[in-house]
Image (cartoon, coloured by chain):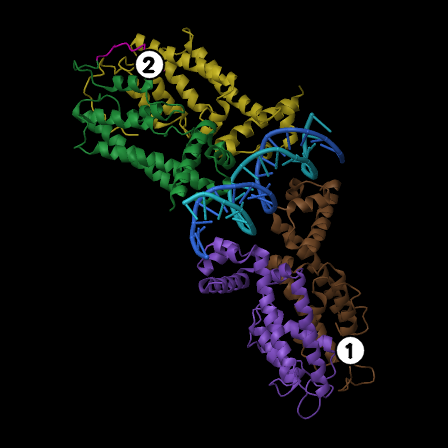
Chain colours: A green, B yellow, C brown, D purple, E cyan, F blue
DNA sequence: AATGAATGAGTGTTCATTCAT
DNA sequence: AATGAATGAACACTCATTCAT
């Protein structure tokens, strides 16, 4: 592949990402092309049709996340605890353009390749949650599946951002307090959404 | 407004609700009209344009929920505890067609009237959570905002249904165990979603 | 169907016929709509897609011809001889917009409904040729299939017209001369194309 | 012109011929280039635009035929009779890719250069028919123009092939029977195509 | 008041043609 | 001189909206 073609391909993907993020799956090919400073024909040279572009973006974002999650799931990872590994993955999740607009997610969902990655991602995260609970760094009184739900709520909301207070608070709340107690009655009134 | 006109309006709303639920925001005016047994012209007699119809549906569903939440929030409500009131509101939430497809929610989100109701709904639910924690029926070791997140995860997922096991399990998990202890260390590894 | 809709449908068909005749199958939907004094949307209300329009026109022309051929094939038809019946059918053929441009014919050919009619048309014409030969009004020294080929050459050329000298000459040449002889050596030098 | 350039030109023409034969005028420049093992850029180096390529192919095929017909028309040609010369020309005609799809023929028809060759071809063939009838080897009871029509039917049908039974039968039927008689009344009912 | 036919701007997509590599 | 990437006008088709019946 020629250098300029590869460059253009990247420009297209970036433009599509931006367009979908800002305007949802409603963003048209023409608009994406305009953002990329190219013409529609070039889009179609790189992606056979609209859904191929959507799929590519969804797969790239998800694949990136899954790769990172896999790395962090390996015991020999740099993270000192499974809890910390989980925090890193979730933080990375918010850094990635995973928070694609809901409608793009909906558009990509039925694609088998996307479904497969979502399932792997879920499995990796779930395993991390369970492991963190086993090692005692993540409170054990919440079902792993519920924890996953909370994480998803935190990271996949439209507009989620890496530095989000919600994510921070969430992990604070999920951590087993160092003094050994998730003592009942602790008021957490400040950690509102 | 004549009786048949009011009837038509209701039929239209019901048809739109069904169409959006099944086919997402992709559902067209013609399809909605067909489901309603009417013609597009009649749709436009009742709603000036598509977004007015979307807004009406979102407001109806949300308004219904907020009204119910308001009623349950009044201390003199029939619910014996705030925990029970919360459970009723959440159950009602799942009964309502609030779990509209993500794309419809996205379409309705920017409307100020919808935003206002979402905020009121969040405030009411949050107050109920705090109150339930105060009265000791809802475990206090989870931040109210996190509880809200879990509830949202449980109720607003696409495809959520009133009888959902997740909702049941969630409230089981949220209840302070009768023996007085949310004892630390309880493993919940088997309670996967 | 409303009166104006039926009128418009006819206008569309006429416009499509004219457009295809003049510009071949390359004629676009927009042009057909413009000729009809309508907008593309109306074309698509009446015909689900381009090929449906092409098919309709081909079927109408062919169906008309086949109906006429069927009528003339009935022994009790008004034509005194099978030869005369054949001549009428072929003349009618040239009167119909059957001489659609080659590319339209090519576009319509793969449609099963069109193929079926073409086959029936061929069968009817072939039967007429054989019958005319049996009754002695059509010279018997040419294979019926070859006669059919000649007829097709005469009628289905692009630009064929009812009054065509070729058709006249062709039937003169096919007729058994009244004096009983297709005598060898007759010069026909004047009957050139 | 360099040797490789001439070679490329030939390859392009052959590829275009194959593409048009198989897929009709719908064949695109990119497909032709792919068949030729070249890129579109090279096509445009040899032919200024699509219609130039179409014209070249039509002219080549027709010119080849006309040259052959001219040669056979010269009295001193190798053919023992005019009838045999005609048979050779027609056979050659079927060997040439003249039977291009209808839509290509339509595309090339309006070009004056093509029209001129078609007319010369018709004139040559017609003259051969008349001459063959004069020398008594081609039955004289069919108008030369009609004979031409039959020949066209036989050779220019889409899908016509050199060895075609139709061509053989046609010439058998056109030949004056050796016993001297195209005797009237001969039934040919069984010789269906 | 209801109908459903007509509108037309907009979308995805193609392809002959041009031009940087 | 060849390549193949980029162009952009054109096409088939859709659908929210309007309006004659």
Residue D191 seen in render: no
Label 1 resides on the chain identified as: C
Extent of the magenta region:
A183-193
C106 w.r.t. D121: above or below? above
Q: Nearer the viewer, residue B130 or B79?
A: B130
Q: Nearer the viewer, residue D145 or C96?
A: D145
Numbered badge on residue C175: 1
- Horizontal placement of B35 versus D142: left or right? left
Task: Please provide percent x and percent y for residue D54.
Answer: 58, 60
Instruction: Please tell me whether mark 2 or mark 1 is closer to you in this view.
Output: 1
Task: Please provide percent x and percent y for residue C109.
Answer: 61, 60
Q: Quadrant of residue C127?
A: bottom right
Residue name at image x 42 percent, y 6 percent: B76
Q: Which residue is mark 2?
A: B144
Task: Please provide percent x and percent y for residue B185.
Answer: 18, 20
Provide the major secondary structure of the magenta segment.
loop
């Amino acid at each position: 592949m020629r250098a300029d073609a590869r460059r253009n391909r990247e420009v297209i993907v970036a433009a599509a990402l931006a367009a979908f993020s800002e305007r949802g799956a409603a963003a048209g090919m023409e608009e994406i092309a305009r953002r990329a400073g190219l013409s529609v024909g070039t889009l179609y040279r790189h992606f056979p049709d609209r859904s191929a572009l959507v799929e590519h973006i969804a797969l790239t974002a998800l694949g990136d996340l899954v790769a990172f999650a896999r790395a962090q799931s390996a015991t020999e990872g740099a993270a000192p605890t499974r809890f910390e590994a989980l925090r890193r993955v979730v933080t990375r999740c918010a850094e990635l353009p995973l928070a694609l607009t809901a409608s793009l997610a909906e558009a990509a969902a039925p694609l088998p390749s996307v479904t497969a990655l979502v399932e792997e991602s879920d499995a990796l995260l779930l395993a991390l949650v369970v492991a963190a609970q086993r090692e005692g760094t993540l409170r054990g009184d919440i079902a792993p599946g519920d924890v996953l739900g909370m994480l998803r709520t935190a990271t996949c909301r439209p507009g989620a951002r890496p530095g989000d207070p919600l994510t921070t608070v969430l992990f604070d709340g999920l951590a087993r307090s160092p003094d050994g107690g998730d003592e009942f009655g602790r008021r957490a009134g400040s950690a509102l959404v």
